Image (tube, helix red, strand yellow):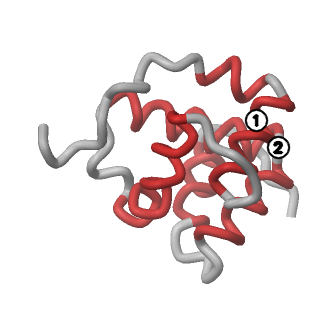
């Protein structure tokens, strides 16, 4: 399991963060380098780019599910935050299409 990210934060209540605008924005400020980070926020920030680029290959099962849940939620409910994240971590749009196509396949409508 040395090649996996730490599972220290796998039990975090992701839904609570996603559905609380203040919490969500503070995590976004952290990963975008615009604000302070909690320990779990720092962990996310340290690995987000690599996880995005590798399709989460070092993620634990919980992290993979969490990533998918988060991406789907942001595309469906917080499109501006999703756009901000992809502009920061995927300026060339290499991976965004893959994740958006996966969301569309689940019936999530993405306004153009």
The image position of residue 54, as x and y in percent, is: 35, 62
Q: Is residue 58 above or below residue 90?
A: above
Position of residue 13 relative to residue 67, above or below, is above
**Label 1 to label 2, Cα distance in Å?**
10 Å
Residue identifier under label 1: 24
Farthest residue, direction bottom: 92
Which residue is farthest left? 1
Residue drawn 60% across the image and 24% down it:
14
According to the image, label 2 marks what residue? 78
x, y (%) of residue 10?
41, 24
Q: Quadrant of residue 22?
A: top right
The spot of residue 98 in percent (x, y) is 52, 62
In screen coordinates, is 94 left or right of 104?
left
Check whether the beta carbons of the residues at disc 1 and disc 2 lie within 8 A of each other.
yes
Residue located at (76% from left, 58% from top)? 34
- The single residue placed furthest to the front in the displayed view is 36
Query: Which image quarter is the N terminus in?
Result: top left
**Mark 1 or mark 2: which comes first in sequence?**
1
């Amino acid at each position: 399991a040395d090649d996996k990210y730490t599972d220290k934060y796998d039990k975090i209540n992701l839904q609570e963060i996603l559905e609380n605008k203040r919490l969500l924005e503070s995590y976004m400020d952290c990963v975008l380098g615009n604000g302070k980070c909690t320990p779990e926020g720092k962990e996310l920030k340290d690995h987000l780019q690599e996880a995005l680029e590798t399709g989460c290959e070092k993620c634990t099962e919980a992290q993979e599910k969490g990533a998918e849940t988060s991406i789907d939620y942001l595309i469906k409910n917080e499109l501006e935050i999703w756009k901000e994240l992809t502009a920061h971590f995927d300026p060339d749009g290499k991976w965004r299409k893959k994740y958006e196509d996966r969301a569309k396949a689940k019936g999530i409508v993405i306004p153009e």
